[in-house]
Image (cartoon, grey):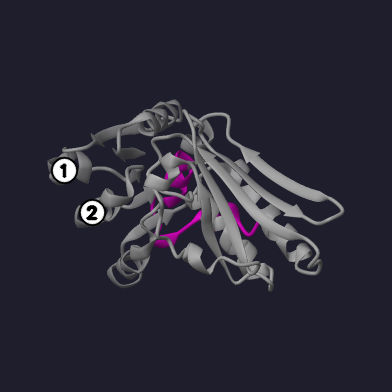
């Protein structure tokens, strides 16, 4: 399979390594200030493009890839206010787009565990729930896309929670604060799921969901050891996406976990 990489930083290099190990060709790499490559023959020859960039450039990248008729697999977070634009391209214009807030198999198992646990905890109002997430200082959105996915599942399953809020954050996370459907902190209450974000060093990603009562606490955590799991998942998603049409995600690839 011919793969183009949009974003050629640490994640792009890790994806390149795994893709080559799996027998794929990297036909084009596009990094910052290399937009002219979207119109190159090498980019247009790709069976799929894998995109990991920034929230500000993501939508532009998707549109340029669609113009070249190249399907996109993306793991960029912080841009979801534009998701209807992409779904429209897939549903009405025949484009192909695979999105995941996190490509790690372990995280997607964690999503399933979180979903199941929150359904159980809906019956036990003595337990309050909150979340914490930690990422490297280069991450440009807060809370993370993974944290938002976890939070939205909790809110949909626990009737006493009607939204989530980024309540506390480190100084680095404060500078990256996301507007992804968060409740304003001024309306924070016992009915709002509170998320604390930290940005520290080169941490790949740690997410925790904590339930607490007067009697005890229950905590589930996913702690990524490196970027390798994310990169492998992105390549597997590209393999799955090749030859398909429409708006796709991890549930399509993994089945209903």
Q: How many marks?
A: 2
Q: Secondary structure at mark 1?
A: helix
Q: Earlier in the sequence, mark 2 or mark 1?
A: 1
Q: Do the CB atoms of the residues marked 2 and 1 lie less than 8 Å apart?
A: yes
For mark 2, give the secondary structure.
Answer: helix
x and y percentages locating residue 65 in the rendered image: 24, 51
**Residue 133 at least partly seen:** yes
Q: Which mark is residue 35?
A: 1
Check the picture and name the quadrant holding the C terminus: bottom right
Q: Classify residue 118 by image quadrant.
A: bottom right
The residue positioned 41% from the left and 62% from the top of the image is 247
Q: Which residue sits at x=37%, y=57%?
A: 97
Q: Is residue 252 magenta?
A: yes
The magenta-colored residue range is 234-257
What residue is rendered at 33% in x and 50% in y? Answer: 55
Residue 60: which numbered mark, if any? 2
Q: Is residue 40 above or below residue 60?
A: above
Q: Residues within 10 Å of mark 1 (few under 14, many from 20)?
A: some
């Amino acid at each position: 399979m011919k793969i183009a990489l949009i974003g050629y930083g640490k994640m792009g290099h890790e994806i390149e390594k795994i893709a080559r190990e799996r027998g794929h060709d990297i036909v084009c790499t596009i990094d910052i200030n290399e937009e002219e490559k979207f119109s190159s023959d090498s980019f247009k020859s790709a069976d799929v493009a894998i995109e990991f960039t920034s929230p500000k450039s993501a939508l532009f990248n998707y549109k340029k890839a669609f113009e070249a008729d190249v399907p996109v697999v993306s793991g960029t977070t912080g841009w979801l206010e534009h998701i209807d634009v992409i779904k429209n391209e897939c549903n009405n214009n025949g484009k192909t787009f695979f999105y995941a807030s996190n490509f790690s198999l372990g995280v997607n198992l964690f999503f399933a565990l979180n979903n199941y646990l929150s359904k159980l905890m809906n019956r036990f109002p003595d337990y309050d729930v909150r979340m914490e997430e930690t990422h490297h200082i280069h991450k440009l959105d807060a809370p993370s896309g993974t944290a938002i996915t976890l939070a939205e599942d909790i809110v949909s399953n626990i009737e006493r929670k009607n939204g989530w809020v980024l309540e506390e954050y480190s100084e680095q996370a404060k500078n990256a604060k996301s507007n992804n459907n968060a409740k304003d902190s001024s309306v924070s209450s016992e009915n709002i799921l509170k998320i604390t974000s930290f940005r520290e060093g080169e941490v790949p990603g740690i997410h925790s969901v904590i339930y607490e009562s007067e009697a005890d606490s229950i905590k589930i955590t996913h702690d990524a050891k490196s970027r390798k799991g994310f990169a492998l998942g992105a390549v597997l998603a590209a393999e799955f996406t090749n030859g398909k049409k429409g708006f796709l995600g991890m549930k399509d690839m993994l089945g209903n976990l």
